[in-house]
Each structure stands twice: as structure tokens, then as C-alpha cells.
Amino acid sequence: MNLEGKTFVIMGVANKRSIAWGAARALDQLGAKLVFTILNERFRRELDKLLGELEGNHDIIVECDVTNDEQVEASFKEIGEKTGGIDGVLHAIAFAGKDELQGGYSETTREGFKNALDISAYSLAVVSKYAKTIMNEGGSIVTMTYLGGERAMPNYNVMGVAKAALESSVRYLALDLGESGIRVNAVSAGPIRTLSSSAVGDFKSILKEIEERAPLKRNVDQIEVGNTVAFLLSSFSSGITGEVLHVDSGYHIMA
Ligand code: 0WD
């Protein structure tokens, strides 16, 4: 697979453990040009440091808090002007308060629910709205989800509800943007230790359960997820849209 001449926007690198960073490394290896969006300026120094590890020279970094419509619009406008058009977007963004990620779902606050659904699910719609205006022919949008969106899993709570909304959004966006030749898919990753996942109560036992019960008897890493993201962003997956593809050592097939 060769992605030379292709440009992708990567949203959601917080640090070197981020799934978005695994995807960036995979895409960089394949020759793609990358543009990064960061939540705020606090993340710029971390990203600058990380960029030195990549082969290509990826120098466009744009601030984009997805809760701010004007900022999303302005970000994609700026990216369009600087790149002349993009071939895809990785949306690897989610948020829920730590209090919501332990204990019972019935204790979820209205504010916590709104926040989680806004940042983790609605954001894909608004990102798609502006990304489609600068998308080259055959563009692709990929988001990140988790099995907790399909099944009730301890502690995942409101984030599971947000992932269910996100996966449904993938299908509606695929239908909406299909006519424009834009594909929309999700990767459902197995658990990986990152800044976000560390907020999920008893995360250690989730990792252990995969090692014991998944067909591959091990956990996946950021590069394996990143390689699948690269496949979905590339034209190798040109017939796939509205799909949720599991990269989880096969755990989701188990009863
Ligand atoms: O086990 C895991 N780590 C899994 C993660 C399994 C399956 C799916 N995922 C998903 C997550 O739910 C998320 O959608 O993958 C995506 C990426 O998550 P990650 O790589 O595990 O987490 P992290 O490295 O923390 O990156 C998520 C980033 C944020 O980091 P922090 O830690 O600051 O919340 O999302 C970004 C931010 O950089 N983010 C935002 N970006 C723009 N606007 C916003 C926002 N309002 N809020 C958070």
C-alpha cells in the first residue's frame, strides 16, 4: 500500500500513546502527508516533539476544539487553503468525566451526558460537514469506537451510549455523503492503555479478560489499529462504507 500524494487530517493526538498517533505513524510509513488538529495550544509542544519521530515533514497543526462550531469551520477552511484539498480524516476524539466512568449508569448527570455525547458523537457530524467541503474525489472519514457501544460493559456507562450514537452516526453519514463519493467507517478497537482509557474504572481487568478470552489471546496495539485506519482511509477499501470494523483480537465474536 502506497499513500504518497495523499493528505489526511488526524484529529486527537494527545500524546505518544494516543491511537491517533499510532495511525499517524502507520500513515507516515506509507508516504502520506499529514495535517494535525489539536484540542488546544497545550498539546502543541507535545505534538512538535513527536513529529520529529516521523519520516515525512508534516508541518500543518491547527487548533480545533470540536465543541466550537466556528473553530471547526475555520480549521477546515485553513486546512483547505494550506493543502489544496484532503483525502480523508481520522476522528479519534472522545470525552467523558471520570465520575461517569465508574459505578452505575443511572447516576449519570444530565451535564455529563450532554458533554459526552457532544464531544464523542455529535463532533463526527460537524467535522464531516466541514471536511466534505475540502475533500478530494473518493474521500474517506474514519472514527474510533469501542465494543461498549454494542454491549453493556461495566464502568463504560455514558461513553457506551455515546459510542452507540457514534456508530449510528457512521451509518447516517455514510448514507448522506455516499452520493458525493465520500465513505464513512469506524474502527472498533480493543482496549489500549491511553490517557482517555485510564479514566475507565478497572481498566486493568478489561485488558486481562482479552488476554484470557479473545481468540488471539493477546491485546492489540496502536500500530495494529493504525494500520486498519490506513486501510479504511485508502482506496484499498473503496467499496466499504457505513461499516464498523473490529480490531480487537477477535474478542467481539465471543459469547
Ligand atoms: O482503549 C482505548 N484506548 C480505546 C479508545 C478503545 C476503543 C476506542 N477508543 C477511542 C476513544 O474512545 C477515542 O474516540 O479512540 C479514540 C482515541 O482515544 P485514545 O487514543 O484512547 O485517547 P487519547 O490519547 O486521550 O486521545 C483522545 C483525545 C483527547 O485527549 P484527552 O486525553 O485530552 O481527552 O481526544 C481529544 C483530546 O486530544 N479531545 C478533543 N479534541 C477536540 N475537541 C476534545 C475536544 N473537545 N476533547 C477531547
Image (cartoon, rainbow, N blue to C red):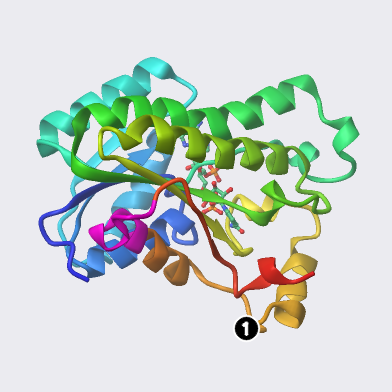
Residue 55 lies in what quarter of the image?
bottom left
- In this rendering, the answer to whether 171 lies above or below 16 is above
- What residue span does the magenta drawing correspond to? 230-240
In the picture provided, is 146 more to the left or to the right than 75?
A: right
Residue 121 lies in what quarter of the image?
top right
Given residues 173 and 93, the one toward you in this image is 173
Q: Amino acid at mark 1?
A: Leu
Q: Is residue 241 visible?
A: yes
In the picture provided, is 96 more to the left or to the right than 236?
A: right
Percent from the top left, x then y, of residue 180?
Answer: 25, 33
Callout 1 environment at 10 Å: few (<14), some (14 to 19), or many (20+)?
some
Q: Quarter of the image for the N terminus: give it.
A: bottom left
Residue for point 12% across, 34% down:
82
Q: Is residue 39 visible?
A: no
Given residues 242 and 224, the one toward you in this image is 242
Given residues 115 and 233, the one toward you in this image is 233
Q: Which residue is mark 1?
A: 216
Q: Quarter of the image for the C terminus: give it.
A: bottom right
Percent from the top left, x then y, of residue 47?
Answer: 34, 51
Residue for point 45% across, 71% down:
224
Residue for point 38% across, 34% down:
41
Counting the numbered discs, the total is: 1
Percent from the top left, x then y, of residue 21?
Answer: 40, 58
